[in-house]
Image: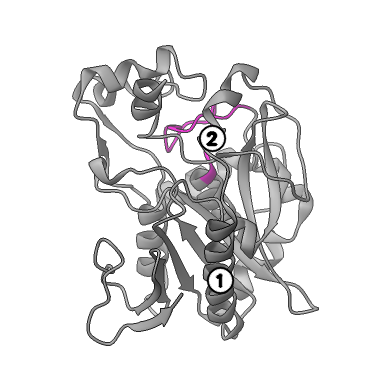
Amino acid sequence: MKIVRALAALLLVCAAGATGAASASSGASSGASRFCDRDQPLTAAEQDRLLRFAAVLREELAVTEDGVALVSRSGLDLSRFGIRYSHAALAWRSEAGLWSARQLYYACDEGRPRIYDQGLAGFAMGTDDPKLGYVSIVRLPAQAVLALRPALLDTPRVLHLLGAQYSANAYVYGLRYQNCNQWIMEMIAAGWGNLADGGDLRERAQQWLRDAGYAPEPIAVDSRLLMLASYFVPLLHLDDHPDEDRWSMKLKVSVPAAVEAFVRRSFPASERVEICHDERQVVIHRGWTAIADGCTPGEGDVVVPL
């Protein structure tokens, strides 16, 4: 089982058994649920640490003037592939001032993808390693929020953008499957492109992204064995990827880093805050440079003892 999880770790980025708000129907393999389970339940100390980490996240979002931000968190360990963040969501503030993370999850209990509004504590606690976790916040300028928020809160458009089938490593410009970060990108396209609702909304959103130059850096798969993971991991597929990408073992998949890069290029005034925790402290790092591995504070970083 450990070998299977190691193989699946490359691209199993959106699976969870969370509960939430808006829903949509879709088919998926019920056998995938075993890949969604946490190896060990959180201890009381780990829960307390993650709740305090979530409180820092909430404080950072509280100073966000506009009502939408891009948030990403570390999940499964993807450092082998140079990936820190695996799962992105669009955080939005209600009229009552409460923040929720709207996102696509593969609902393990139901065997299908769903759209969920999740509290910030639940979002922060979705990390695979309770001893070391990272969250990134990208604050959007007013003009970006003004264009995106109506689409994000329009339930018909939100659900029309939900793919019928889930694949953790969905091809960025394929319509057969979808992963969590690709839903974010298509949601951004619907908002910034002012795309009307309709059954072909995903297709039009992807065309808008092509026209806007969205081209995520390919993920280099360094092992043929990893490429075979799709044969025994129900949430991984390769049949939607172009032949040349499979042969070169370089897969074009939406990951949070690609989403952030597109947002920054589209709206250079966007601001980024990175927050991490280990077992001793929370570190708050501002700017587009990456915080040091191991949650090591650098010059100018804010340290909050745990």
Q: Is residue 186 above or below residue 239?
A: below
Name the mark on residue 101: none
Name the mark on residue 178: 2
- Viewer-side residue, 108 vs 103: 108
User: How far from the left and from the top, in percent, is residue 18?
Assistant: 68, 44
Q: Number of labelled discs?
A: 2
For the stretch drawn in magenta, the main secondary structure is: loop
User: How far from the left and from the top, in percent, is residue 98?
Assistant: 73, 74
Q: Which three-letter amino acid code belongs to the residue tagged 2?
A: Gln
* Quarter containing the N terminus: top left
User: Which residue is disc 1 drawn over?
Assistant: 52
- Viewer-side residue, 150 vs 285: 285
User: Which contiguous range is marked in magenta?
Assistant: 165-180
- The part of the image, by quadrant, that contains residue 293 is bottom left
User: How far from the left and from the top, in percent, is residue 86?
Assistant: 42, 48
User: How far from the left and from the top, in percent, is residue 25?
Assistant: 75, 31
Q: Secondary structure at mark 2?
A: loop
Q: Secondary structure at mark 1?
A: helix
Q: Is residue 296 above or below residue 259?
A: below
